[in-house]
Image (cartoon, rainbow, N blue to C red):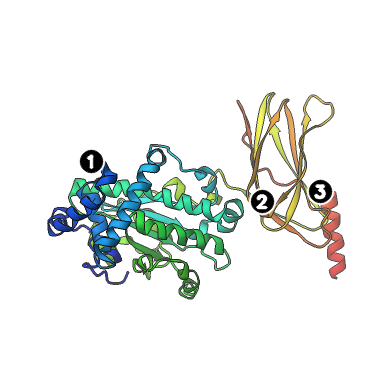
Amino acid sequence: FGKIDDTDMEAGGGMRHNIDSLITERRGLIDQLASAVSDLTGGSSEFDDIFLLRFILTWERRGGLPKAVDACRHTIQWRVENKQLLDSVCLPGGKAPNEDKIMKFETVGPAGSLGGVEPIYCVRTGYCNVKGLMTTFSVQEISDWLHVIKERNYRVCDERTRKTRKLVKCITVVDMTNFSMFGGDKKFYEALGDSSKRAAVNYPQLLGKTVLINAPSFFRVLFGTFSVFMPQTFLDKMAFCPATGTSLANAQNASVCPFVRKFCGDNRSDIPTFLGGDMRSPDHLVPREECNSALTKVVLANRSKTTVEFEVPGDGFTAKWEVLVQDFGVGMSAVLVPSSGGAPIKVIQDCKVKADGGLAEGVVELPVKGTLQVTFDNTYSMFRGKTFQYRLDVIGEAASHKTQAPPKEDPVGNLADRVQAVVHM
């Protein structure tokens, strides 16, 4: 993990330092800061000594009291203006704007703690679809989401600091299992860099350390590419853990890690299994392809199409669909074939789902019992095959939930494949 300078609070030091001693040692600076922001606080208990201390600790080596005043004033104004949003994000089941849709691409979230004290936030980067994320959302939308969800860890750290009377910070673990150097996106790194710069002002002393684990050997070279987007204060808190294969059955457990031993002893009960602990992995950290919500990947040859069928077990059902195209676009349409006979009912008009539109989704009415036939069409493409992912759920009472039926073989597609094979012989 690298050695932590325990005296450098902004580079990860000070974890579990006695909060009352820190306040006493900096009493004069805290009082000066309180006076400088008193016109904004309105006497609110939210902005007390512990709140102000984090600003003093952050800026005492990097600009002193004037910088702490500027950052604190900005943060108080931001917190007051966004109070409703910050409160709602932290409610049980509360969501940040766009979060439900964002989490269809991300495998991130809370991952236990160090001995019940420091919260662990894990990013399983090899199981995140960053390219799909950034074709669906703007840099600003992702930066805003990354920033506002830090409020959850901030409130946990603040509550535990007050309870234990020790300075509690968050540990971010970046699990690089399954990481590919081709899976990144420059726009995501821009969003990450922007949110990190904002967090350095609005969330002082929140991040204790960012630990990269299960990193492939080439990553240190790649790291230099996107580190230019990060503030130095963020980079100072980063460390590489030499452990690899921590999710494997024969992996060493987390207690062999000196960092874990320092803060947890032999207690691994609050560390997830894929990091060498004993805690069951939270659902949000299970790769989507292993979940019931997984998308099915299809590789569709040029000049071909494929049809997927779903049972509609009664009248008055609906179908919820998602399609994510890797490059260019693919045609899509759907008909409902009534089980009682009669003409097929067009429920999705012919359309083209394009990659640059990101995740496409919709809901259609299925008025009668029958078979829903969804067709993906690439017959218009003379030379280029298409790769896409899809999911469809038939929703309603007694629905079969056969959401990922295998593609139905299509004569046009088979013929196109045969012709293509002949051309290349």
Question: Is there a contact, CB below 8 Å, between mark 1 and mark 2?
Answer: no
Determine whether 299 is above or below 336 in the image. Answer: below
Name the residue type under label 1. Answer: Gly
Name the residue type under label 3. Answer: Asp
Residue 262 in view, yes or no: yes
Residue topped by disc 1: 43
Near mark 1 (Cα within 10 A), the count class, few <14, some 14-19 or many ≥20, is few
Q: Position of residue 291 (x, y in %)?
A: 53, 46
Residue topped by disc 3: 410
Looking at the picture, tell me which residue is in the foreground, 327 or 269.
327
Residue topped by disc 2: 357
- Give the distance between the C-alpha atoms of the residues marked 2 and 3, in whole angstroms: 27 Å
Q: Residue at x 34, y 66 (%)?
A: 237
Name the residue type under label 2. Answer: Gly
Q: Secondary structure at mark 3?
A: loop
Q: Secondary structure at mark 2?
A: helix
Looking at the picture, tell me which residue is in the foreground, 425 or 381.
381
Which mark sits nearer the N-terminus, 1 or 3? 1
**Quadrant assignment for the C terminus:** bottom right
Determine whether 235 is above or below 85 in the image. Answer: below
Q: Secondary structure at mark 1?
A: loop
